[in-house]
């Protein structure tokens, strides 16, 4: 005789999401984020069933227990939302269970109406509630409510329909919703959910080159004096005032002289050309060193401290490549690829050639090279850097990133890695699976209404568990044709889309000045800052009304004021009868007291959106949800409508899915309309299911509307 271990519980639970590679890698989340949970739960026969999503924190304590609701009819789909309130490696479990109350209530309603087995059905209901009242974990008040239902069902002096109505008592209904009668409870495996700090999945990024901030040109000699960390720190208050959370610096290390690139990627650099910061390494040092023109370690520490004082985190470029002058080239030639002629292979991305850069080879001495990189990362963490924008991670083996990120997170769980990977989807997604919290994305090249809508659906509904995009509107390498030829309206449109559709967005300095001239034949800026100094007079442009900074400031203010815009997976697309008009909404509900609570005795689970925890989750948001919605305890809902054509006025009728807006009866007027306020202009309207819009890209190409909640 032999035993077979069963793989299926009494109530089968399958298709649990979010789950990555059958649980081999954890799904991603950030503190306070609403995480959609779904599962397929079914059973034999016709008895009713239920499902519960359970969240377990790193200590093993059950911290949330959420009753799931049925999804698409006929598909046995169950849905819920969990909201983690602490960081760390959590576990997610879905429980399927038989629901004897729902089974009995359905049968009793049908049979009593038909006069079939009337007394038997009422007696079975009484017996069911007696069993429930015997549960000693229920409160005295709950047991009293159940006992009252038993008396009502068994009162033979009353009409059977009146007796059955005792099972529909509101107190009983609320009791069974909060603590249902469950039988044959069957649990799924416990799947990993990695909950990280807010900046791992929320934030506005600003990129600038420190050497350009405060750089001075001397026309009499044709030489430049480089900007320094001290002069670059003078730019930080303006960045903070625009509402950014992260200031990202390209590499700040010594730059090689051999094969140095000149202006506009010229092969021959002049003696005064500063070279590309990505050509790392010179006799002054490598990845652990600071370019002497920028200052000292003390100067960098002062820059980081100034940023922190202003509420800014500093992100540093981690570019694992070397100039021919890097110390590693002579000390560790085995870390590079040697060609048959004895030369070291430089970087290529045909037809592009990067003669000033040697890529690393992780196959010759993987142990030695990975230790060297870890040492570099640990050094910069010690210097105050907790966010790394990783250059071209898709050109290094996945195993290395899985090892490095896990190794760093064991000691520094707060460290964030952003993948600068513009490559095939499989690699971009795999980088997320092995540990990168964020990634650059295809957003830059999604410009038409339908392109944007399709991409938003993909990243919010299909890949969010492992791939978190950061919507950069431009980079030193990327100046899209849309921005080159779209005029100022294009800049507004792209900023609105990036800032409101995604909790992560970013821009490279110069975007606010409408810089749009490309190098002929290339999709990058003319006089590219990668190869030369490029100081800008931001203050003068703003004084002359030639800056987008006030508009960007307003967008970031709106983001900070509305928690609905700080989640990724809460986006709903709406329809418009014009192919250039995109409409979507984002909503975030307040969780009423007692709705998402663990059973008695397993610790506190309640999350109040108006407490200190909310401020940790949403930096810069005072009292989080209550302030922005106007009334504490209601949903925060934002509707965004954008004209994606930067050249022409577009009109449309926008048709809304009203269910997605979390509207309550008191929010509607007698005609079924609700009040909205445009957060860009301050204007108010009454909207309904179908609404006329007219958007002029030369004036204002978008509506960002908050739904006004009524008492």
Image (cartoon, rainbow, N blue to C red):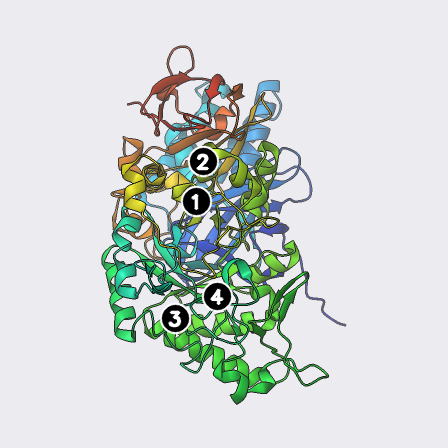
Secondary structure type for disc 2? strand
Q: What x and y, as percent, mark residue 355? A: 59, 71
Q: Which residue is mark 2?
A: 586
Of tags 1 and 4, the one toward the viewer is 4
Q: Tell me whether the residue at label 2 lies in contact with that at label 1, contact meaning CB atoms closer than 8 angstroms.
A: yes
The residue under label 1 is 567
Please, what secondary structure does the residue beneath circle 4 have? loop
Q: Residue at x 37, y 32 (%)?
A: 171
Q: Residues within 10 Å of mark 2 (few under 14, many from 20)?
A: many
Marked residue nearer the N-terminal end (3 or 4): 4
Q: CA distance from mark 2 to mark 1?
A: 8 Å
**Relative horizontal placement of residue 8, taking residue 246 as reference (left or right):** right
Q: Secondary structure at mark 3?
A: loop
Q: Answer with mark 2 or mark 1, whichever residue precedes in sequence.
A: 1
Q: Could you tell me which residue is drawn at 53 percent across and 61 percent down? A: 26
Q: Residue at x 25, y 42 (%)?
A: 623
Q: CA distance from mark 3 to mark 4?
A: 30 Å
Residue 365 in view here: no
Residue 158, located in which quarter of the rendered image? top left
Nearer-the-camera pick, 638 or 367: 367
**Residue 516 can be seen in this image:** yes
Distance (Cα) linking label 1 and label 4: 36 Å
Residue position for label 4? 276
Query: CB of mark 2 within 8 Å of CB of mark 4?
Result: no
The quarter of the rendered structure image containing the C terminus is top left
Task: Tell me the mark number nearer the camera, choosing from 3 and 4.
Answer: 4
Percent across and percent down for residue 222 are 38, 63
């Amino acid at each position: 005789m032999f035993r077979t271990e069963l793989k299926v519980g009494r109530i089968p639970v399958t298709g649990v999401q979010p789950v990555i590679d059958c649980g081999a890698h954890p799904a991603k989340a950030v503190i306070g984020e609403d995480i959609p949970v779904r599962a397929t739960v079914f059973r034999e026969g016709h008895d009713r069933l239920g499902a519960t999503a359970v969240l377990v924190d790193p200590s093993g304590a059950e911290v949330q227990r959420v009753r799931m609701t049925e999804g698409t009819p006929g598909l046995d789909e169950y849905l819920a939302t969990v909201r983690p309130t602490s960081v760390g490696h959590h576990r997610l479990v879905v429980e399927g269970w038989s629901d004897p109350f729902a089974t009995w209530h359905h049968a009793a309603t049908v049979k009593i109406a038909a006069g079939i087995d009337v007394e038997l059905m009422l007696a079975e209901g009484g017996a069911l509630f007696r069993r429930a009242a015997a549960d000693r974990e229920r409160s005295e008040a709950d047991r009293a409510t159940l006992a009252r239902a038993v008396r009502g069902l068994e009162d033979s002096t009353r009409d059977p329909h009146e007796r059955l109505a005792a099972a529909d008592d509101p107190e009983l209904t609320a009791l069974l919703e909060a603590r249902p009668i469950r039988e044959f409870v069957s649990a799924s495996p416990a799947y990993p959910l990695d909950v990280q700090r807010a900046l791992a999945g929320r934030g506005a990024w600003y990129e600038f080159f420190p050497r350009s901030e405060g750089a001075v040109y001397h026309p009499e000699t044709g030489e430049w004096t480089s900007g320094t960390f001290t002069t670059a720190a003078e730019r930080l208050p303006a960045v903070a005032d625009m509402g950014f959370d992260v200031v990202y610096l390209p590499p700040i290390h010594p730059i090689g002289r051999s094969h140095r690139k000149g202006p506009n990627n010229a092969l021959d650099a002049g003696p005064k050309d500063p070279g590309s910061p990505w050509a790392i390494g010179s006799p002054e040092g490598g990845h652990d060193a600071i370019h002497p023109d920028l200052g000292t370690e003390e100067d960098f520490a002062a820059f980081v401290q100034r940023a922190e004082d202003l509420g800014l985190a500093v992100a540093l470029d981690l570019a694992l490549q070397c100039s021919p002058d890097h110390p590693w080239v002579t000390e560790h030639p085995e870390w590079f690829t040697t060609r048959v002629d004895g030369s070291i292979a430089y970087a290529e991305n045909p037809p592009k050639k990067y003669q000033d850069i040697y890529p690393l080879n992780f196959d010759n001495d993987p142990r030695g090279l990975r230790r060297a990189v870890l040492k570099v990362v640990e050094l910069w963490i010690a210097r105050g850097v907790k966010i790394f924008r990783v250059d071209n991670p898709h050109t290094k083996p996945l195993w290395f990133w899985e090892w490095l990120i896990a190794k760093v997170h064991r000691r520094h769980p707060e460290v964030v890695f952003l993948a600068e990977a513009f490559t095939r989807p499989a690699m971009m997604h795999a980088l997320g699976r092995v540990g990168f919290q964020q990634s650059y994305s295809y957003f830059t090249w999604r410009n038409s209404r339908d392109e944007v809508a399709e991409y938003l659906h993909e990243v919010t509904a299909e890949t969010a568990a492992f791939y978190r995009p950061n919507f950069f509107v431009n980079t030193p390498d990327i100046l899209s044709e849309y921005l080159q030829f779209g005029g100022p309206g294009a800049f507004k449109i792209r900023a609105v889309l990036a800032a409101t559709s995604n909790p992560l967005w970013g821009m490279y300095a110069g975007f606010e000045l409408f810089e749009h001239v490309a190098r002929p034949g290339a999709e990058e800026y003319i006089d590219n800052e990668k190869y030369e100094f490029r100081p800008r007079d931001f203050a003068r442009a703003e004084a002359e009304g030639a800056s987008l900074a006030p508009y960007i400031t307003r967008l970031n203010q709106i983001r900070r004021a509305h928690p609905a815009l700080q989640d990724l997976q809460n986006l709903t697309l709406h329809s418009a009868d014009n192919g250039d008009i995109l409409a979507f909404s984002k909503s975030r509900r307040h969780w009423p007291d007692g709705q998402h609570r663990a059973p008695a005795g397993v610790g506190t689970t309640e999350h109040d959106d108006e407490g200190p925890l909310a401020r940790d989750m949403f930096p810069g948001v005072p009292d989080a949800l209550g302030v922005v919605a106007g009334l504490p305890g209601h949903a925060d809902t934002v509707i965004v409508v954008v004209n994606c054509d930067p050249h022409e006025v577009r009109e449309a009728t926008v048709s809304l899915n009203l269910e997605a807006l979390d509207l309550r009866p008191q929010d509607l007027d007698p005609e079924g309309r609700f009040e909205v306020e445009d957060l860009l202009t301050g204007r108010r309207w009454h909207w309904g299911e179908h609404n006329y819009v007219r958007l002029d890209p030369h004036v204002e190409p978008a509506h960002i509307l908050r739904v006004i909640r009524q008492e």
